[in-house]
Amino acid sequence: GRRRIGWFLSFPIPSAGLRQADFRDSKPHKASQRMQIEENFRGELLELTVKGVLDNESSLHFRSAIDDHVHDGWHRIIVHMQDVSYISSAGIGALITAKKRLEALKGTFGICTPTPQVERTLAQTRLLDTLLCDPEQIRDSNTVGDYTRSLNARIARGEGLDLQVYALGSKESLQCRVFGSPEPIFESTFTEPNCQSVEFSDRSFALGLGGLGDDFASVRSRFGEFLSVCGAVAQSAQSRRGLPDYSLSQGDFIPRTQVLYGLQCEGGFSQLVRFDPIQTGEPVPVSAVVAESLRQAKCTLGGFVILAESAGLLGVHLRRSPAGETADRVERFGFPEVRDWLSFSPERVYSRNLVLIVGVAKAGQNGLSSPALDALLRPVDPAGELHGHFHAAVFPYHPLKKRTLDLFTSTRELFDSGTIQDVLHLLRDDRSIAGAGESELLGGACWVSPIAEITEGNGCRS
């Protein structure tokens, strides 16, 4: 029989679906016999002491060390050079590259206490003033703002996860609004009465099937998966090699989205959960992050925004609009028609990318619920105890700052880069032989809050 998108995958699915992102190898840097690096961590500041020579060979070791620390979230770095006896152009190039990279991340990089030989070389190349910094001044400003200073992390450990939990607002909760029903995608087609025109505020996140535009007619041939975070709306591309479209609220402009079905959560987040695998480099399932975040928030129904490094995503998106003129009453998810309607990869894709995931999840059968919301939730963990609905936007990888993050700033920086690569509906593939399981992450941040109220499409509240 017919199987439903993102919920069951027992029908044959072509492998030539989603584009596979390039895998960025993570190679440990080689130790140099000509240079050693000592590390000293001071709050948000990392101080490196370099000993030996900084030439072409040892600069590779230095670059690799900087890459590793930036990848781990250190964006404020100073380098002590009182034990460096020689620096070549290659070494100077490594310092300049590090400075440009940290400044691009709105961080800090500089050198201090250079030996007379190093100071003379840098002065002759007219780069001394560019690189030299006052370590005491940087130590005195060793914070990313009052927001970070005022928050204390609670350390915890979950299923395969090391956690730092920050309380953002003990009374914060979310109101969830459910739009429409997914049934027409299986039984018939979507028409104008199925569509709702919505503007998503900066204090909300949303997901569903919809499209950017002013009315149903202008979007009819372009409906697809979408997500919205902090006033940024992105929707999937329908051509195989196309790019997603997106729009950002700015000034008086708020993007208008035509929604066939989906959900919106509005309000504040109660907790920020920073998570890393207990075993470095060992991926963790999205369901484990979600389940543990629900436990930390002490709720059974919650809304989530996750910003993390991906170890591989498993998801789908539509290739054709289910409201288009040719969409009327056709078998979309049988074989071979599914090849024309659904883009799916039988293996995880977008490993080592940065992903922005939004969604809602419920643990168990008790607690707040509504028929409209339940219609959008499906099992996301192996035991079938956790139900949810998640969409993900994919971006090229860049490191996240350690400790706390501001969701609005982080989201806007991603979309302002103009580098969004895909928008996917995440799913769990439990086919007995070929099933790939679920999406996995390598560490990141999860904003979570309980859902206190549900508004259904007919306006009644639960």
Image: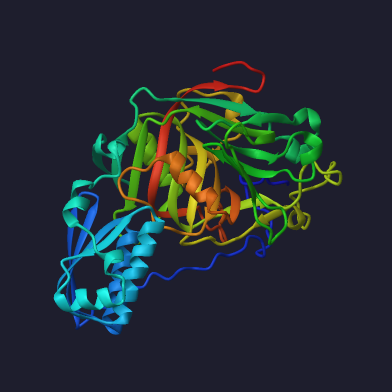
Q: How is the image coloured?
A: rainbow
Q: Position of residue 167 (x, y in %)?
A: 31, 32
User: Count the marks: how many?
Assistant: 0
Residue beneath the point at 77% across and 33% down: 215
Q: Is residue 204 above or below residue 124?
A: above
- Examine the rendering and report whether any part of residue 38 can be seen: yes
Who is closer to the viewer here, 35 or 164?
35
Tell me where residue 200 sits by quadrant: top right
Q: Position of residue 449 (x, y in %)?
A: 42, 31
Who is closer to the viewer here, 73 or 329?
73
Residue beneath the point at 63% across and 52% down: 316
- Examine the rendering and report whether any part of residue 28 can be seen: no
Q: Is residue 11 above or below residue 458?
A: below
Q: Position of residue 110 (x, y in %)?
A: 26, 62
Residue beneath the point at 48% across and 62% down: 351
Q: Is residue 61 left or right of residue 2?
A: left
Tell me where residue 192 sits by quadrant: top right
Q: Is residue 19 above or below residue 249?
A: below
**Split into 4 quadrants, where in the image is the C terminus?**
top right
Q: Is residue 132 left or right of residue 349?
A: left
Q: Position of residue 75 (x, y in %)?
A: 32, 55
Who is closer to the viewer here, 131 or 366?
131
Residue beneath the point at 33% across and 73% down: 94
